[in-house]
Amino acid sequence: MGTTFIYYFKIQQMEAFVKELLKHLEAGLSAIDPESNPIKGYDKAVELARHCITTLKKHLLSHPIEDETSQIYYFKHIVPVIYSPCIYYIKLHDMELHRITSIPEKFSVYLTKELKEVSEFLETNGDLHRYYYSGQQSHDRHYFTNRLAEMRDEISIVIDSSLCPNSYLLSKILAYEKYRGILKTELEGPPPEALKAVAEWKGKKADAVELIISLHAANALHINGKPATIAQIKEQFSKFASVDLKDFNTIDNSNRARKKAETPFLSQLSTYYINRKGRLL
């Protein structure tokens, strides 16, 4: 009874430590700017994931796992969730590197090759994959007690020399599951145009030209840090609102020659806005 209590106490301690470790990892990953250089972003993600592994290894030095039951739990439930992020982000880093250094056709070949290799790996290790998700424990001693021989792989720089082979394989399985989803999405490409929401300009073309000229004059739109030109605003507006403005200059000249209201559309917008005052949203 006393041994069982000590076992569960150690497991609870380990789970609490790992939970906190993953919490810090998620916080670090969330702090990475998604708009920054993707390569640098994945470099940082790999760095954070490796730090997570080394922190766990240091923890084990002062909190060694001695009994076999605890070791099995560690190899089956702790190692995979700590090691798999490192493998996953290394693969994403390499994929992004190929994206920016390859022509689209070559990048597509790379993605197809990666998907084939990942799928073959998951199929080859299908027994372990299924055993893990089945929740069974009958073969735990078989799967999660043997030690790992010297190896060279994605995370050999931080891998624990006493890790068991199936524990590491399981880490790769969890990482490759997520990676396979990314590869499929990349290969499938964007959703069909029919599924996308399409904006359509229902006003007059003269109104659109009036609006574009005003946005340009007000320097309200910037592209790459510089005020957008009329041509740039026209191009972006035409795409967004699905309106043909090839006769933009002709319409603009016609607008300028107006005898009555010079800006009828803008004046109407102003009236709409003022009349809205006091209304509930």
Image (cartoon, grey):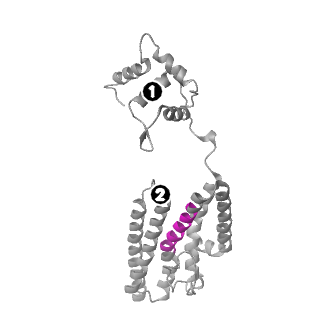
- Identify the image quadrant of the N terminus: bottom left
- Image position of 164 with respect to 217: above or below: below
Q: Is residue 56 above or below residue 2?
A: above
Q: Residue 86 has which mark?
A: none
The circle on residue 213 is 1
How packed mark 1 is, by other alpha carbons closer than 10 Å (few <14, some 14-19, many 20 or more), is some
Q: CA distance from mark 2 to mark 1?
A: 34 Å
Provide the residue designation for mark 2: 37
Whether residue 135 is visible: no
On-image quarter of the C terminus? top left
Q: Is residue 116 left or right of residue 43?
A: right
Q: Say which element carries label 1.
A: helix
Q: Is residue 53 magenta?
A: no
User: Is 173 above or below relative to 201?
Assistant: below
Where residue 115 sits: x, y (%)? 65, 63
Q: Residue 222: percent from the left, percent from the top?
A: 42, 39
Kind of residue at disc 2: Asn
Give the mark count: 2
Q: Residue furthest top?
A: 259
Q: Residues within 10 Å of mark 2 (few under 14, many from 20)?
A: few
Q: Residue at x 48, y 17 (%)?
A: 255
Q: Position of residue 107 (x, y in %)?
A: 64, 58
Image quarter for residue 215? top left
Identify which residue is drawn at 43% across, 62% down.
29
In which quadrant of the rendered view does residue 227 lie? Answer: top left
For image coordinates 59% across by 65% down, the residue present is: 177
What kind of secondary structure does the magenta stretch mostly adopt?
Answer: helix
Q: Which residues are magenta?
A: 80-96
